[in-house]
Image (cartoon, rainbow, N blue to C red):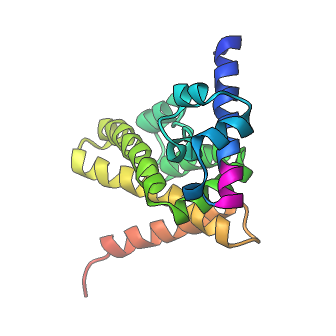
Amino acid sequence: MTVSLRERRRQQTARDIQIATLELAAEKGLETITTEEIAAAAGVSTRTFFNYFTNKETAAIGAPPAFKEEDLQALREGTGSLATDIKIFLDKHIEVLAGDEPILKLIGSVLRSNEKARGILEGFLAMGRIELRDCLNTRVGNPYAAAALASSITDTIGRAIFLWEHEDSLSLDAALDVIWEGTIRASQLLAAPSE
């Protein structure tokens, strides 16, 4: 799918605003900067800022990468074990996130210090969980199990990012592998008969 020049320009402007927001937040703290400062740093008018974002917290979070439709379809129609297909899905999404590691680190810093930004991200995650739940329900045929799996998937992504941020020796995909191993072990403990 080709993206029009106009859409590429819109995406670049949004990214410029997000980067300016994150850099100013790293320097001064998100609470202390203004939308006017952000707009000036991004080289846009304040009006343009508000055409893209409703507030500075939304600008800091930006639009997290959505799950790719082809990856959702592969998960929905997968023929491998569910665990294998979920791990493939996670690997592909982490690969997308890894393409923007400097932004991830800056967003992490904002999230640790700003409750409103955490709430905005949680809204995006909730939408992603609904999409995953619907996708997985097609495969597992149980909306409650699908919802639990969807929550586990988004939680796994978040925990992998957190581990990567705090362990300098781990790449993002290696952090995912560590968290995934823990998730699989936890599911085995839940499935084990009680003694």
Most distant residue in the bottom direction:
195
Q: Residue at x 67, y 12 (%)?
A: 6
Q: Residue at x 38, y 37 (%)?
A: 131
Residue 135 to residue 84: above or below: above
Q: Work out whether residue 100 or residue 78 is closer to the camera in this orientation and state it.
A: 100
Q: Which residues are magenta?
A: 22-28
| Residue 137 horizontal side relative to residue 18, left or right | left
Q: Work out whether residue 88 or residue 51 is closer to the camera in this orientation and state it.
A: 51
Q: Work out whether residue 23 or residue 165 is closer to the camera in this orientation and state it.
A: 23
Q: Residue at x 58, y 57 (%)?
A: 32
| Residue 62 horizontal side relative to residue 191, left or right | right
- 117 falls in the magenta region: no
Viewport quadrant of the N terminus: top right
Residue 142 to residue 134: above or below: below
Q: How many marks?
A: 0
Q: Residue at x 69, y 28 (%)?
A: 44
Image x and y of residue 128, in percent: 42, 41
Residue 193 visible in rendering: yes
